[in-house]
């Protein structure tokens, strides 16, 4: 076994740099080096929560699993890392939820699909209308979905942030 030959699929993982052998061109037919621009956070709410979400107002969140779908055209990993960090200025709706006690990100999915398509592919209910959807032009209603007590991401892959 030689050290070369790691698959190009590593592209979607943290770090984001192609790992082709030194100087070797990426062969045609391999997945193009298009980085993921959308992501989903699987969020666990440990116990029922009442939480103020910026200017949206105050809402009740049942305990269980939620999926938040967002996008970042650049610096996707920095965005995801920011979501997983507790200390930060509260800016997006999801920041308010993630800052609440007993709330944490338990999985992350990265995707090249558009965020609205990704969001719509997830079932579940809309706990807060307009949540994370200020820029949504596709009529999603919200980019936060409530999945139920024990759901996981449909296509969670290794390398995601726990
Ligand atoms: Zn949308």
Image (cartoon, rainbow, N blue to C red):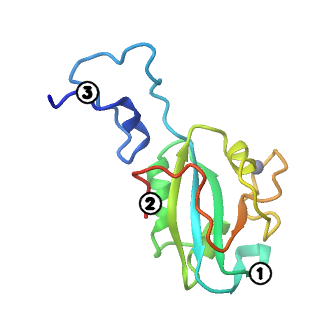
Q: For disc 2, does the CB lie below 8 Å from ligand 1?
A: no
Residue visible at 58% across and 62% down in the picture: 152
Q: What element carries label 3?
A: loop
The answer to whether 140 is drawn above or below residue 31 in the figure is: below
The answer to which quarter of the image holds residue 42 is: bottom right
Task: Report the residue marked by disc 3.
Answer: 5
Q: Is mark 2 on a helix, strand or loop?
A: helix
Indicate which disc residue 38 carries: none
The residue positioned 47% from the left and 66% from the top of the image is 84
Report if the beta carbon of the residue with label 3 is closer than 8 angstroms to ligand 1. Answer: no
Q: Which residue is drawn at 39% across and 51% down?
A: 159
Q: According to the image, label 2 marks what residue? A: 81
Where does the image place residue 116, in percent across and percent down from the top left? 73, 46
Q: Quadrant of the C terminus?
A: bottom left
In three-dimensional space, the C-alpha distance between marks 3 and 1, rounded to whole angstroms, equals 50 Å
- Could you give the CA–CA distance between mark 2 and mark 3, rounded to whole angstroms? 29 Å
Q: Nearer the viewer, mark 3 or mark 1?
A: 3
Residue 69: image quadrant is: bottom right
Location of mark 1 (residue):
59
Find residue 151 and report its horizontal and vertical position in percent.
62, 65
Q: Mark 2 or 3, which is nearer the eye?
A: 3
The answer to which of marks 2 and 1 sits earlier in the sequence is 1
* Residue lying furthest top: 28
- Which quarter of the rendered picture does the N terminus lie within? top left
Q: Residues within 10 Å of mark 2 (few under 14, many from 20)?
A: few
User: Taking 21 as reference, is 124 above or below it?
Assistant: below
């Amino acid at each position: 076994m030689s050290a070369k030959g790691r698959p190009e699929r590593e592209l979607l993982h943290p770090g984001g740099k192609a790992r082709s052998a030194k100087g070797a061109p990426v062969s045609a037919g391999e997945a193009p080096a298009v980085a993921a621009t959308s992501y989903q956070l699987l969020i666990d709410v440990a116990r029922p929560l009442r939480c103020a979400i910026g200017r949206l107002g105050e809402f009740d969140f049942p305990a269980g699993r939620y999926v938040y779908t967002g996008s970042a055209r650049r610096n996707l990993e920095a965005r995801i890392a920011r979501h997983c960090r507790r200390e930060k200025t509260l800016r997006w709706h999801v920041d308010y939820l993630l800052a609440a006690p007993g709330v944490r990100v338990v999985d992350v999915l990265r995707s090249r699909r558009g965020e609205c398509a990704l969001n719509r592919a997830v079932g579940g209910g809309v706990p807060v209308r307009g949540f994370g959807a200020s820029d949504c032009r596709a009529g999603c209603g919200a980019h936060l979905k409530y999945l139920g007590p024990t759901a996981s991401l449909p296509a969670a892959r290794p390398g995601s942030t726990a």
